[in-house]
Amino acid sequence: MFAEYVDGSSPRAIASGLNRDRVPSPRGSTWAMTAIRGDLRRGIGILANPIYIGQQVWNRSRWVKHPETGRRVRQERPRSEWVTTEHPDLAIVDVPTWNAAQARMGACGRGGLAVGRGRTPRHLLSGLLKCGECGGPIVVLDRYNYGCSIAKDRGTCSNRVRLKRGPTEERLLAGIRRDILNEEAFQRFQRAAGAALASAAPNTDALRRRLSEAERERDNVMRAIREGVITKTTKAALIAAEAAIEEASSGLERARQFQPAQFLPRAREAWQRITASLADAARDVAAARSAIHDLLGEDLRLVNKNGDLFAEIAASSDAQINVVAGAGFEPATFGL
């Protein structure tokens, strides 16, 4: 890998070659270019890890609690605090090759990984759409296009389609407004939701009967105790009756608090919020992404239907939004 990289191959090309030759990754799956390229600052990834020249670096980072979220986050330490130990027996790459690889990565100007974990996507559809062939995320390939990240980074997916970013976003948003965020569609939702809520309403009559039966059983046990009829099962029967009374009483109280009429007004508010967020997608990408996710779910697949591309909602193959006409996409090479 180091020799290929120094000779000019990109991490993406190296990963694709390994996958093409069916060479398994350390975890037994396919190779991703990020596993090869790595991050010079953090010393991770094959090309950036000094263990391959027999150096092990300790104390690179520490974990601290975020003051607002309370979550543990990684914080890089200054180089002066690093502790490096030499292990010549672990070296499998010669120093000149290592230095040449580090020089090339430094010359790229990004020190390895361009995007850190957990970074909020800056583009409307990045990661929301899934590839219809491999299920991998559709991401921004470059300044102008979306495409399959698995095909880009691993070369194991045959989907080499590029989607023009601007027209694709416009078509999807237009389709959502036309087919989903219209009054007729909302009225259909209200009718279906109302019927579902009505069928899900607790049966208070049945709960009252259960409560009455449990109380009658408890009274019978207490009457037997007062009359001196005490057996090994008396205590167990009393405990069971009291538990049944508690369960039925709690269920009846929850039933009294069940207020389906409050749901549909809130649904109207959510519908209006989503509509407003999508209308302002250009200025608030995060809110628009959240609105699309709330509306369409987590499995929105990009499928090819006779030359046209559709964003297909996984819950129903009939729920499709045309995003690109047949002539509107082109094969991608991903720089290989």
Image (cartoon, rainbow, N blue to C red):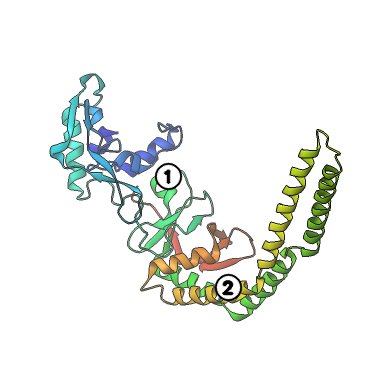
- Neighbor class of circle 2 (other Cα within 10 Å; few <14, some 14-19, many 20+) is some
> Residue 251, which numbered label?
none
> Is 40 located above or below residue 200 in the figure?
above
Is 197 located above or below residue 25 in the figure?
below
Residue pictured at 83% horizontal, 37% vertical: 230
Q: Position of residue 111 (x, y in %)?
A: 22, 46
- Near-viewer residue (201 or 120): 201
Q: Depth check: 207 or 136 in front?
A: 207
Looking at the rendered image, the disc whose residue lies closer to the viewer, 2 or 1, is 2
Q: Is residue 83 visible?
A: yes
Image location of residue 326, percent across then percent down = 51, 66
> Is 311 situated left or right of 84 in this image?
right
Q: Quadrant of residue 306?
A: bottom right
Q: In what element is the residue under mark 1?
A: loop
The residue lying furthest to the top in this view is: 89
Residue at the limit of the structure toward the left, as seen here? 80
Kind of residue at badge 2: Ala
Residue at 54%, 61% in the rendered image: 297
In the rendered structure, find residue 155 and report the number of the disc placed on it.
1
Task: Return the disc, 2 or 1, that comes first in the chain's sequence.
Answer: 1
Please tell me which residue lies in front, 267 or 164.
267
Q: Is residue 215 above or below residue 184?
A: above
- Mark 2–mark 1 Cα distance, whole angstroms, equals 43 Å
Counting other residues with Cα less than 10 Å from the Cα at mark 1, is it few (<14), some (14-19), or many (20 or more)? many
Q: Which mark is residue 267?
A: 2
Pinpoint residue 26: horizontal percent, then vertical percent.
40, 31
User: Split into 4 quadrants, where in the image is the N terminus?
Assistant: top left
The relative height of residue 150 versus residue 323 in the rendered view (above or below) is: above
> Which of the 4 image quadrants contains residue 163?
bottom left
State which quadrant residue 161 falls in.
Answer: bottom left
